[in-house]
Image: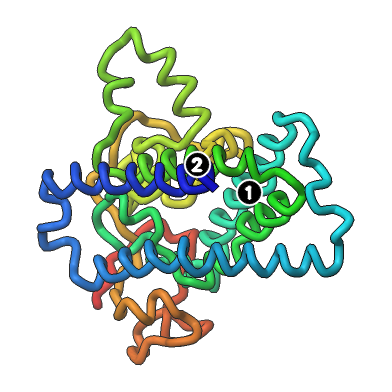
Amino acid sequence: MEAENISKLIPVLVLLILGIIESLGGLYFDDKRSKNDLTIELVSLTILPTLIQPAILALVLFVMNLWFPVYEDYFINSYVLWHILAFLVFDDLTQYFWHRFSHENAFMWKLHRPHHVVEEMGVLVTYRNAFLYYAFMPGIWLSAILIFLGMTEVYLYYLPIKMIVIMSAHSETKWDRILYKYKFLHPFAWVIERTISTPSTHYAHHGLTSKDEISNPNGNYGNLLFFWDVLFGTAKITRKYPSKFGAWNKMKEPWYVQLLFPIIKSKDSRSELSSIKTNMDYDPSKDYKDFVS
């Protein structure tokens, strides 16, 4: 139980530290971040770890114990590197494809768009997604199965490491700047930026338009490992940071519409969240266009 508590506590502490640093820099006190944005971020931050993930874990463990009890802790004594590889493939790689699919499919985009319509980066952006985006995320379900199979110990280390990398990649602290500042660190930077997500590579994913020659709105999908982008040809590395963020259709609906779509739809017919399919649906082939709300 102690290891489990530590595993949960570490990401919380990192979130608080990064949030305090960003707050001292004035990030959450300007005009770009509305109360609606902060509500989306705080509700998402609360619901995912306290409701969605525990519910999925409980359901998977119940079903597996009911139908496949013989496989409980089946791999508990197998080589630890196999456990690590299992989480990297069944959680992080599937999340790469889930994330990529959400930029290629109009309906999936509507579940993912809360993550992109905000016009600033910051650690709280990490969890901005509609509830159904997480509820159906394959990696969460598959991780629960791996836990049932006896890989809990590795998961208690894997999860905080992954969350630290992802939160840091969204953070305004831009920790990777020091790697680019000093020439003797450039070889180390070359390895790091092709292995894990960094602020530079992930900021590029959130950038408004690739016309700035920095942003890569339809690429740089990696979460823990940026290596997947390198492997599948969706990587763009510039060691720079976009100055503008958002999405080309940035009409901002109330927080409950963005997080609960399609259960709750927008009442504004001009919104892509007004229906499952609309004439305003996101088109990934359009890099950017002015949108008048």
Task: Please provide percent x and percent y for residue 259.
Answer: 41, 74
Relative to residue 150, is residue 272 drawn left or right? left
Identify residue type, mark 1.
Asp
Task: Please provide percent x and percent y for residue 179.
Answer: 33, 20
- Residue 106, compared with residue 14, is above or below; it is below
Identify the residue at image location x=62%, y=34%: 231
> What secondary structure is found at the residue carrying circle 2?
helix
Q: Nearer the viewer, residue 103 or 25?
A: 25
Instruction: Measure the alpha-carbon separation of dots 2 and 1.
Output: 10 Å
Binning the other alpha carbons within 10 Å of mark 2 as few (below 14), some (14 to 19) or many (20 upward) gives some
- Mark nearer the N terminus (2 vs 1): 1
Identify residue type, mark 2.
Lys
- Residue 161, compared with residue 40, is above or below; it is above
Res. 220 in view: no
Q: Which residue is mark 2?
A: 162
Which quarter of the figure has residue 136?
bottom right
Identify the residue at image location x=74%, y=33%: 82
Task: Please provide percent x and percent y for residue 67.
Answer: 86, 67
Furthest residue in direction front, as rendered: 1
Q: Which residue is mark 1?
A: 91
> What secondary structure is found at the residue carrying circle 1?
helix
Identify the residue at image location x=23%, y=45%: 243
Which quarter of the figure has residue 59?
bottom right
Q: Nearer the viewer, residue 222 or 168?
A: 168
Give yes or no for contact between labels 2 and 1 (Cβ–Cβ under 8 Å): yes
Q: Nearer the viewer, residue 189 or 246?
A: 189
